[in-house]
């Protein structure tokens, strides 16, 4: 009804106006002139609007980003996205970013937009709940021209506080749950490997255990975690530069509890008659041992040969003879009481570095032969003046990882082309 009334009113006004003008002597001319004028004005206005430059949305000024308006808090901000990388800009660097953000909708999206302005690609994200707000940890890939200072400034512009920026390594591009499960498997299989697993879990600088029973509660400070237990003693975990979070504290305690459970299960297992001690001998190999070494390779499963050499077939005849050449390598053999070779370990010399390799017959794996061979080979490398010993294996080869973590002083882990490369600097004693 309201719309119909409006139409009737408009028609009445138009009729009165038109009748009044038509009553004049030149009324028709006046109506034509008025109509033409209105049409011309409409055309000019439309043309002016079409040629007027449009405003483009952009990132808000820096002094407004820290305190966005109510509207911006409800929905993510819009940002100018950098042009795609081309040519030499394709070279990138991995960075690990950690920043405290206010726990409110849109903050993380806003941070992603600010980083996109630097052509930064977010590879992974982990959220740590904190007492106030949240702590976001991001693994990002940025053009090599982007500096740590620029990344810190971007985190601050996004409304973050306490930003931390460190260079990351390609081996960190692993699935966090999968990495945690692998560490848990290591500790469950060997509870004495807890300290090395904590270093990998928390990227800690040092983990030291004092075997003194303690009933003190677990404690956390910015750079130190203290885990106490009447059986395990006191474990002190140190990490400089990057404060620990409550989530990391909980993970460390869970791994400690797993080690205690594994020890208890081993201690309360079914008693079995003690096996008779076996006599084994460890000797240095030479070309006369070729037949025995070839027989060891034939007795190993394709999986064991693949872990050692990267191929189920293993080395050919020339490759085996190279491992038995003293001028090219240093190889140790383990023989059982019958004289059969049941394990071998070798170092292949590469100037001031060496490549370590182990092969243990499948039915003898897990008996400590690999650890024994590795310790002797490390001492041989030190005597020769070798600076670094490398070992290449598959990422899921827990035995090799455990051996290197146990024998070497905090070896580095690098994942490249699907293979895990462990490197140990020979700066101290490798243990007995």
Image (cartoon, rainbow, N blue to C red):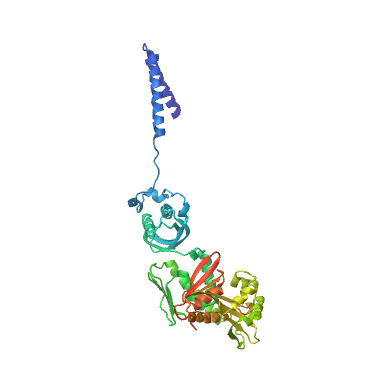
User: Which residue occupies the foreground of this view, 17 or 184?
Assistant: 184
User: Which residue occupies the foreground of this view, 287 or 335?
Assistant: 287
* Picture quadrant of residue 362: bottom right
Image position, residue 412 (x, y; %): 48, 71
Image position, residue 366 (x, y; %): 58, 79
Question: Is 26 rendered above or below residue 304?
Answer: above
> Which quadrant is home to the N terminus?
top left
- How many numbered callouts? 0
Residue 149 seen in the figure: yes
The outermost residue toward the front is 327
403 to the left or right of 104: right
User: Which residue occupies the foreground of this view, 193 or 166?
Assistant: 166
Question: Is 81 rendered above or below residue 235?
Answer: above
Image position, residue 367 (x, y; %): 58, 81
Question: Is 359 rendered above or below residue 90?
Answer: below
155 to the left or right of 346: left
Residue 139 seen in the figure: no
177 to the left or right of 209: right
Question: Is 323 rendered above or below residue 5?
Answer: below
Residue at 45% x, 64% y: name it: 168
């Amino acid at each position: 009804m309201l719309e119909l009334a409006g139409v009737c009113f408009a028609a009445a006004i138009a009729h009165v106006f038109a009748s009044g003008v038509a009553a004049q002597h030149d009324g028709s001319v006046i109506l034509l002139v008025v109509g033409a004028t209105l049409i011309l004005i409409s055309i000019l206005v439309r043309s002016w609007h079409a040629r007027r430059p449009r405003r483009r949305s952009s990132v808000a000024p820096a002094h407004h980003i820290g305190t966005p308006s109510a509207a911006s808090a409800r929905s993510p901000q819009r940002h100018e996205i950098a042009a795609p990388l081309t040519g030499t800009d394709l070279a990138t660097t991995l960075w690990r970013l950690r920043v405290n953000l206010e726990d409110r909708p849109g903050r993380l999206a806003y941070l992603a937009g600010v980083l996109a302005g630097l052509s930064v690609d977010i590879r992974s994200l982990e959220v740590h709940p904190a007492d106030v707000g949240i702590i976001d940890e991001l693994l990002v890939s940025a053009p090599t021209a982007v500096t740590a200072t620029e990344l810190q400034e971007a985190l601050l512009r996004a409304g973050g506080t306490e930003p931390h920026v460190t260079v990351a390594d390609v081996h960190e591009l692993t699935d966090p749950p999968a990495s945690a499960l692998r560490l848990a498997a290591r500790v469950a299989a060997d509870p004495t490997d807890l300290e090395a697993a904590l270093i990998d879990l928390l990227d800690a600088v040092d983990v030291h255990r004092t075997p003194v029973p303690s009933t003190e509660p677990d404690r956390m400070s910015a750079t130190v975690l203290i885990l106490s237990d009447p059986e395990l003693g006191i474990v002190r975990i140190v990490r400089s530069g990057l404060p620990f979070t409550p989530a990391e504290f909980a993970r460390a305690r869970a791994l400690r509890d797993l080690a205690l459970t594994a020890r208890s299960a081993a201690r309360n297992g079914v008693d079995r008659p003690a096996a008779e001690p076996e006599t084994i001998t460890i000797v240095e190999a030479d070309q006369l041992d070729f037949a025995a070494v070839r027989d060891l390779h034939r007795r190993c499963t394709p999986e064991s040969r693949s872990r050692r050499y990267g191929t189920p077939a293993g080395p050919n005849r020339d490759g085996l003879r190279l491992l038995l050449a003293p001028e090219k390598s240093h190889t140790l053999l383990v023989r059982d009481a019958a004289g059969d070779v049941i394990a071998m370990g070798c170092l292949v010399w590469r100037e001031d570095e060496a490549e370590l390799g182990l092969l243990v017959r499948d039915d003898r794996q897990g008996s400590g032969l690999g650890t024994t061979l590795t310790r002797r080979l490390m001492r041989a490398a030190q005597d020769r003046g070798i600076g670094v010993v490398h070992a290449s294996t598959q990422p899921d080869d827990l035995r090799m990882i455990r051996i290197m973590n146990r024998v070497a002083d905090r070896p580095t882990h690098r994942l490249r082309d699907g293979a895990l490369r462990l490197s140990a600097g020979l700066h101290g004693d490798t243990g007995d």
